[in-house]
Structures are given as structure tokens and as C-alpha cells.
Image (spheres, rainbow, N blue to C red):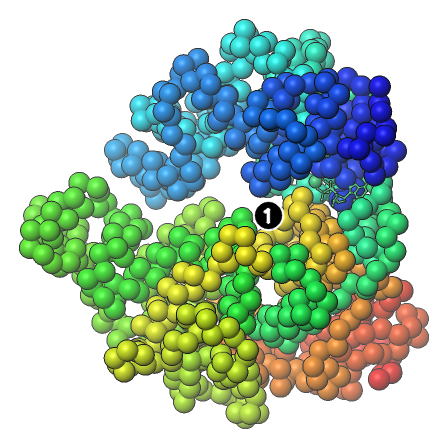
């Protein structure tokens, strides 16, 4: 009774139709991006319900994000006129939560158990450390959290963890204490949700069998990114294990793409696919090879790129859609130019080509990259939305840093005080704060001032915080904004705090990015313009005109509140002149406040590549394609890491339907310094027939010296300790002395033919050029040996 003329099956290709209408039994769909895996999964649910093979209550579907679950629900509701309330659809965490709520007693939890997010969890561990006098130098709370989570993800309770050394013994002891504390307080962390519901099913046969019989159909999207415990959990729901095989009445449909496995760093196991095939003795395996999402050139780029990975199950995608437009590659002199170019392209896409803004996505490898993009979009009055992460000025570490800066400016700012008085931890507990608040209430003064009124040890600690703020204020008096922020990040202990933190890398990067933000703010607003010291004489005229333009001349919607506010030094109401720091704090508060597009508003979508998995857009920009950034520098040293980066790039490329833009900058301000990066190797891996290099303004007459100089003038104020940067600028400048060959030129090589010069390094006999040859790929050539002639 397959009824292929059923409307909901219309348009499926034969393989998809086969998958949707599979008879009972387990199945694996292994297929590339955009081949309709998610669509098959959704349509299968609709089909099962429509045909009466299952009721909503008999189906469990696991999606990767809540957003995906909602989308699936909407699509299903459109296909079927029935209530889907009994259906279990959501993320692993969401479903486990539901299970534990329903059986909290059996799971040993109070009915009202609360879920700890990452931050709550961290403060819980800190409290624990304090209560038991744990040496947090030796056992940083964040690392403990990491340790607990990885034990749980391996299914291990404290008693199960092997302890061979005293260090592990200590950590396991703390793990036990942490569990006791959570249990006492009735809270569970993310990893606990999974482990607890796994144990619930494992230890309660009657309950397990109930669910095994209930869920006849289990469907899992993005199966390649499941971790070990999630897979074990799934097995318990699917049936009983007998002789290494799952025996039961359920049918599991797993859907995935090994080329899109991008969470290995969090314990995801592609190996689950092989285990699944074996343990479920999967009778049906279906491949989908037609891509419905992307135009041909985009798809060819994705295919060619992923070919470079060795660890693949192997598959290729084709499309009927025609080649479409070439993939555009843009090289910008600096990251600021990159952002400026991007805004122009977005305006052209929306105005000339009629792309809705929400069909345009900007993808980046690291969260810190969003700041420059956000700022440009903001200035251009383009609504945007940041997904799967906080906007720059809303991130916790940024708010902490700003809170210190605010306290310097305004000792009355109690909110800022409370935010950082014990961050980083200074042994100031909740009870001391209460006492302090009481004193402040009675005397009507600020919390900072009230520190003098509290007695005992608590008072001493509070007063030393007060002193810290005073000393900081003195230290930065008369200093530049950049110096001020650098000093505060250091003296407050924030930098140190995140440096000691295993997962603090990204937060540190964001803190560095705050310095960059201040730097460009100063330049845009013209503070200290006279004071900019420029070591190179060309720079006087190289200050980019665009930066000094007023917002009004950039076609900005005057209704946006911030933009009418004269930030540059003067308060609009009082005429009082703001210090650069005050002006910057106003700027930060406003940028954090209200530029995020309203719900439902048509807005450009910003997200990391990780967050873009499973989504699709008409036009996609992938920015910052530079060695060290994407692929990320942490991944360059090992092959596994590099292949994961390449899969990430594959995910990014395959999000695009019609237009794909790739960009990189020759110099970039990141982590607080300017770096000159080579274009990403991934660009070299794309077939030249599918790409088009957009010519940069002034390309051809490109002079590294001028570029370096202009990057310089854009970035540095007088107090900037810039030795490193001068060095790297010098290295870039050195490349001038390489005879007649310059970057960007087309050259001819006797063996490889014509190619484009991507980069030049070294001087004299050591000079080498990186040349991209359409047929032979990118090569480094020693200029003294390779006889290159300039073609144009
Ligand atoms: P990813 O690996 O990125 O998650 P996917 O394999 O899940 O991709 P889908 O998101 O299901 O792919 O489908 C990609 C796009 O192709 C969607 O817009 C979907 O509606 C469309 N599509 C899928 N199958 C067909 C088809 N047979 N005819 C027309 N469009 C299709
Ligand atoms: Mg999908």
C-alpha cells in the first residue's frame, strides 16, 4: 500500500521514496549535504502517521537543535491535519528531560528538579570547592566541570572511575561531593540529564519495556554527531541486547553524513555508524546522491574540497540544477575592508537581486570574528540576527570587562559592582554581599562606599576590592583607551582567570577583540587623532576616508536611535565632553541594546559554521578564509584536526543554494594584534573552473608597503606597544624586494603555465612566491630558481 500518488510523497526521487516508505526494520541513510535526509526523515513521519502505521505517541524523533525540532514540527503540521502532541520530538537533552520529568521518582529526583546551565554549573562547583577548601589553583573549577562531564559521557559514576594516581583520586572524590551537592539541591547538569535517563532505562526493566513497546519508530537526524552515551541510550529504547545484537520490535532510522561530523572534539563518534550497522544488523542502507540544494558550481566546490580528506566513507553528489553562478572569491587588504565589501555585496544582493535578508547568511569560524561584521552592519543600518551565540557585547566576559570599566567611571554603579566583586573569585560570598547591601541600604550609599562599613574578615576582603578599583583608576588616569582596557583586563585578573581556564581560549580572544573594538572606536570617533604616531611617511594620506565619514553620509536609517547620537566626545544634552572611555561605554551599551533584529523582522543571519549545520540559505558568505583562522591554528598540527576543519568547510559551503562568496583579508586584527595571513588552503582546493576572483579595488597596483601602512594608520594609536606589529609589518614590507614580481600578478612558469601570485615571502635569494596554477594547484616557488615571467 505504498500509494505513490499520495500528495505528501510527490516530488521525491526513487531513493528518497524508498527510504520514506521502507517497511519495518532498521535503516541507515548515509548521504551528503542537501540530499534530502532531513526531508526524508520528516516525510517518513508524515507517511507513517498518514498510513496509520503509527500514532504520534509511537514516534520519537531526535534532532540536533531545538530550532530544527520546531521546523520539523511546523512542516509536519502543514502536511497533516492531526495533533502531534503525543509525539516525542526534540534534542537528546530535551527528550531526556521529558523522560526524567515523567519518572522523576524512579530516577531519584524531586518533581521540580532544575537544570543547571554551564554557568550555573560552574558556580555550583566553585561553591563546592569553597566549602571543602579545595586548592583551586591545582583543581580549577572549570576543569573539574570538564572532568565530571566527560566521566558522565562515558557513563561512569564516581565509583566506576579507575583511580590509579592521587590526582585522579582527588578529582573523583570531588566528583562524588559534587553529585551529593546536586542531589541535595535537586539540580542536574546537562550531562546528568543524559546519564540519569540512561540509568533510568537501564535499571528499570518494566519501564524500559514500556518505552520499547511504545516507540515503534525511532528516527535520528545528524546521527554522525551522536556521542557514546547518546548511542547507548538509543539502544536501550530500541530493544534488548542479545549476543551483541539488538532484539526488539522498534525500527530505527538513522540519518547522517560522515563528511559533516564536526563535533569530534566534544566526543561525537562517527564510529557509531559502524556500530549501528553491526549491532542492529541493519537490513536497509540507502544512499542519496542527488543534491537539491545547491547550484552546480557550489556543489563541485564542496565535492572537490572534501576529496582531500582521507578518512571518508566516500560518496559524491550531483545536481540537475545547472552550474549557476561561479563561486566568488574576494581578497581584501584588511579585515575592515572585508567587512566593508561584505556590506556592499549584501546591499547589492537585497536591492538589485531581490534576495530577502533572511536568506543571506554570514558564516565565520570563531565567534570573535562577528564583532567587526556586526559593527559594519550596524553602521550601515542593516538588521541582523546572531544565532547560536550571543552578540559580542552581550557575552559574559565582555560584560565583566565593561563592568570594571564602568566602576572606574562610576563608583555608584551597583550592578557593575555586583557583577564583578567576586569575579574572578576573591572569596567574597553571598553572605558578605548581603551584609554589604544591608549597610548600603541603611546609609544610602553605594555598595563600593559601603565596603568601609562592613566588619570582620568579610569587610577586609570587600575593602581590598575597593582598593583594587581605586588603584586601577589611578593607574589609567590620562592613559589612552587602549591602555586603559589592557590594564583593566590584566589588573582585574580577568585575563588570568580565562587563561587558567581550559575552555577560556575563546573568551580570551573575545577580550582581545574588545581592545580592537576600542581601537577602531577611537579612530572612528576621532579621539586622539593627533596623537597617532605613524612610522611611515605615506600613511598621512592613507587614513581611509570611509572611516571619517559621518554615519549620515552612509545612507543610514535615521530612525535608529544610536546613530543620531553624537558619540564623538560630546554629550548631546549637556554639552559636556565625554572621555573616550565614557563614550566607548555608551557605544557598547547601545550596541548591546537594540540593534538585534526584532523577532520576525527580515534580517541577515550571522552564525558560526558549527551553528549552521542542517540549515540552508540562498546566499552564503564565508569570511576570514585564512590559514590559522580557518583552518584554525589549533588544528594545523594534526591530520585529524585538519580533516575536521575541512568537514567544517564542507558544511559551510553546502549551506548555499544560489550564491556563495568566500573572502579573506591580507591583514587582520585578531587577538589584539595584526597578523598577515596566507589565504586558506581550502581556497586552493576548489576547482578553478567553478570560481571567480573578484578584483579588489586597486588590484594590480597593489603595494604591500602601502597596504601595511594603511593597516597601520587604521589601527594604532600612540601608546600602543607595537613592537610585534612593527616586526610583522616589516616582514610584509620585505616582500617588496623580490624583483619585479608582486602579489596579485599573473605570472608564467615553464612547467606549470600561467598562475596568480598569492603571496611573497623573504628577500634576495630566499625570496619565495606562492603561486596558484589553475591546473596544478598552489605552489611555493623559490624566485631565484623558478624563472617566472610576468604576464600582466
Ligand atoms: P544537510 O546534510 O545539510 O542536513 P539534508 O540532506 O538534510 O542536508 P534537506 O535539508 O532535507 O537535506 O534538503 C535540502 C533541500 O533540498 C531542502 O530545501 C529540501 O526541501 C530540498 N529537497 C530535498 N529533496 C527534494 C526533492 N526530491 N525535490 C525537490 N527538493 C528537494
Ligand atoms: Mg539535514
**Disc 1 CB within 8 Å of nearest ligand 1 atom:** no
Res 272 visible? no
Q: In the rendered image of this protein, does residue 215 appear above or below residue 66?
A: above
The residue drawn where x is 49% and y is 24% is 98
Q: For mark 1, does the 10 Å Cα neighbourhood hold few (<14), some (14 to 19), or many (20 or more) residues?
A: some
Considering only vertical position in the picture, is 318 above or below 8? below
With 23 as the anchor, is 479 left or right in this view? left
Residue drawn at point x = 29 percent, y = 52 percent:
419
Q: Is residue 775 left or right of residue 491?
A: right
Quarter of the picture holding the N terminus? top right
Q: Which of the 4 image quarters holds residue 101?
A: top left
Q: Position of residue 60 (x, y in %)?
A: 62, 24
Callout 1: SS: helix
Query: In this rendering, is residue 773 above or below 714?
Result: above
Reading the image, the residue beneath label 1 is 611
Q: Nearer the viewer, residue 28 or 353?
A: 353
Measuring from the top left, give residue 682's x and y in whole percent.
Answer: 74, 58
- Residue 316 found in image quarter: top right
Point 68% across, 30% down: residue? 80
Q: Is residue 567 left or right of residue 551?
A: left
Judge whether residue 554 can be spotted in this image.
yes
Residue at the top extreme? Answer: 206
Q: Quadrant of the C terminus?
A: bottom right
Q: Nearer the viewer, residue 438 or 742?
A: 438
Disc tally is: 1
Q: Which of 244 and 56 lies nearest the eye of the viewer?
A: 56
Q: Position of residue 512 (x, y in %)?
A: 45, 63
Report the image quarter containing ligand 1.
Answer: top right
The picture places residue 322, in percent across and down from the top left corner, at 88, 56
Question: What residue sits 53% from the left and 10% below the top?
Answer: 207
Amino acid at each position: 500500500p505504498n500509494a505513490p500518488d499520495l500528495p505528501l510523497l510527490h516530488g521525491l526521487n526513487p531513493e528518497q521514496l524508498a527510504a520514506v516508505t521502507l517497511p519495518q526494520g532498521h535503516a541507515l541513510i548515509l548521504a551528503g549535504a542537501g540530499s534530502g535526509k532531513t526531508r526524508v526523515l520528516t516525510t517518513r513521519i508524515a507517511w507513517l502517521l498518514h498510513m496509520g502505521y503509527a500514532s504520534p505517541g509511537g514516534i520519537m524523533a531526535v534532532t540536533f537543535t531545538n530550532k530544527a525540532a520546531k521546523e520539523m514540527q511546523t512542516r509536519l503540521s502543514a502536511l497533516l491535519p492531526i495533533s502531534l502532541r503525543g509525539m516525542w520530538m526534540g534534542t537528546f537533552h530535551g527528550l531526556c528531560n521529558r523522560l526524567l520529568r515523567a519518572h522523576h521518582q524512579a530516577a531519584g529526583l524531586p518533581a521540580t528538579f532544575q537544570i543547571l546551565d554551564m554557568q550555573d554549573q560552574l558556580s555550583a562547583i566553585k561553591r563546592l570547592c569553597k566549602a571543602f577548601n579545595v586548592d583551586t589553583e591545582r583543581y580549577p573549577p572549570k576543569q573539574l566541570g570538564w572532568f565530571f562531564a566527560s566521566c558522565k559521557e562515558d557513563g561512569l559514576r564516581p565509583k566506576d572511575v579507575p583511580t590509579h594516581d592521587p590526582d585522579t583520586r582527588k578529582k573523583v572524590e570531588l566528583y562524588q561531593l559534587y553529585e551529593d551537592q546536586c542531589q541535595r539541591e535537586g539540580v542536574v547538569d546537562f550531562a546528568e540529564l543524559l546519564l540519569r535517563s540512561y540509568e533510568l532505562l537501564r535499571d528499570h526493566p518494566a519501564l524500559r519495556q514500556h518505552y520499547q513497546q511504545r516507540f515503534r519508530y525511532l528516527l535520528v537526524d545528524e546521527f554522525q554527531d551522536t556521542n557514546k552515551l547518546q548511542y547507548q541510550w538509543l539502544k536501550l529504547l530500541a530493544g534488548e541486547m542479545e549476543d551483541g545484537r539488538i532484539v526488539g520490535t522498534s525500527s530505527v532510522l538513522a540519518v547522517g553524513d560522515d563528511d559533516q561530523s564536526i563535533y569530534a572534539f566534544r566526543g561525537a563518534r562517527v564510529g557509531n555508524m559502524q556500530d549501528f550497522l553491526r549491532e542492529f544488523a541493519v537490513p536497509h542502507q540507502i544512499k542519496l546522491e542527488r543534491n537539491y540544494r545547491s547550484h552546480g558550481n557550489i556543489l563541485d566546490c564542496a565535492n572537490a574540497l572534501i576529496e582531500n580528506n582521507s578518512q571518508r566513507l566516500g560518496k559524491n553528489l550531483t545536481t540537475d540544477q545547472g552550474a549557476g553562478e561561479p563561486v566568488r572569491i574576494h581578497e581584501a587588504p584588511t579585515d575592515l575592508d572585508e567587512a566593508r565589501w561584505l556590506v556592499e555585496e549584501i546591499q547589492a544582493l537585497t536591492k538589485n537581486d531581490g534576495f530577502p535578508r533572511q536568506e543571506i547568511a554570514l558564516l565565520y569560524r570563531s565567534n570573535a570574528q562577528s564583532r567587526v561584521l556586526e559593527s559594519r552592519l550596524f553602521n550601515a543600518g542593516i538588521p541582523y540576527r546572531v544565532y547560536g551565540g550571543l552578540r559580542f557585547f552581550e557575552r559574559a566576559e565582555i560584560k565583566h570587562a565593561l563592568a570594571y570599566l564602568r566602576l572606574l567611571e562610576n563608583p555608584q554603579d551597583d550592578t557593575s559592582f555586583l557583577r564583578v566583586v567576586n569575579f574572578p573569585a576573591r572569596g567574597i560570598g553571598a553572605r558578605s554581599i548581603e551584609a554589604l547591601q544591608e549597610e548600603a541600604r541603611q546609609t544610602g550609599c553605594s555598595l563600593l562606599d559601603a565596603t568601609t562599613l562592613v566588619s570582620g574578615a568579610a569587610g577586609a576582603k570587600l575593602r581590598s576590592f575597593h582598593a583594587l578599583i581605586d588603584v586601577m583608576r589611578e593607574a589609567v588616569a590620562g592613559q589612552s583607551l587602549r591602555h586603559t582596557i589592557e590594564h583593566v583586563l590584566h589588573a582585574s585578573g580577568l585575563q588570568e582567570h580565562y587563561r587558567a581556564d581550559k575552555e577560556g581560549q575563546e573568551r580570551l580572544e573575545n577580550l582581545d577583540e574588545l581592545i580592537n573594538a576600542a581601537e577602531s572606536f577611537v579612530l572612528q570617533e576621532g579621539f586622539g587623532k593627533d596623537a597617532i604616531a605613524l612610522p611611515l611617511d605615506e600613511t598621512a594620506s592613507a587614513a581611509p576616508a570611509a572611516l571619517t565619514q559621518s554615519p549620515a553620509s552612509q545612507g543610514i536609517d535615521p530612525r535608529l536611535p544610536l546613530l543620531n547620537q553624537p558619540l564623538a566626545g560630546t554629550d548631546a544634552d549637556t554639552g559636556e565632553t565625554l572621555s573616550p572611555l565614557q563614550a566607548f561605554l555608551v557605544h557598547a551599551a547601545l550596541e548591546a541594546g537594540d540593534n538585534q533584529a526584532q523577532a520576525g523582522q527580515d534580517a541577515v543571519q550571522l552564525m558560526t559554521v558549527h551553528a549552521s549545520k542542517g540549515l540552508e540559505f540562498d546566499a552564503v558568505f564565508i569570511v576570514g578564509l585564512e590559514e590559522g583562522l580557518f583552518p584554525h591554528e589549533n588544528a594545523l598540527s594534526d591530520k585529524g584536526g585538519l580533516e575536521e576543519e575541512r568537514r567544517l568547510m564542507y558544511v559551510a559551503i553546502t549551506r548555499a543554494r544560489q550564491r556563495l562568496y568566500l573572502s579573506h583579508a591580507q591583514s587582520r586584527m585578531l587577538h589584539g594584534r595584526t597578523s598577515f595571513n596566507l589565504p586558506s588552503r581550502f581556497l586552493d582546493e576548489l576547482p578553478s573552473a567553478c570560481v571567480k576572483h573578484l578584483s579588489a579595488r586597486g588590484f594590480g597596483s597593489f603595494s604591500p608597503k602601502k597596504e601595511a601602512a594603511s593597516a597601520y594608520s587604521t589601527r594604532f594609536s600612540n601608546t600602543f606597544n607595537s613592537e610585534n606589529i612593527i616586526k610583522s609589518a616589516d616582514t610584509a614590507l620585505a616582500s617588496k624586494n623580490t624583483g619585479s614580481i608582486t602579489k596579485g600578478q599573473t605570472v608564467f612558469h615553464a612547467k606549470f603555465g600561467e598562475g596568480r601570485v598569492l603571496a611573497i615571502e623573504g628577500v634576495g635569494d630566499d625570496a619565495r612566491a606562492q603561486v596558484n596554477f589553475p591546473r596544478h594547484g598552489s605552489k611555493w616557488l623559490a624566485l631565484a630558481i623558478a624563472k617566472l615571467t610576468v604576464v600582466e
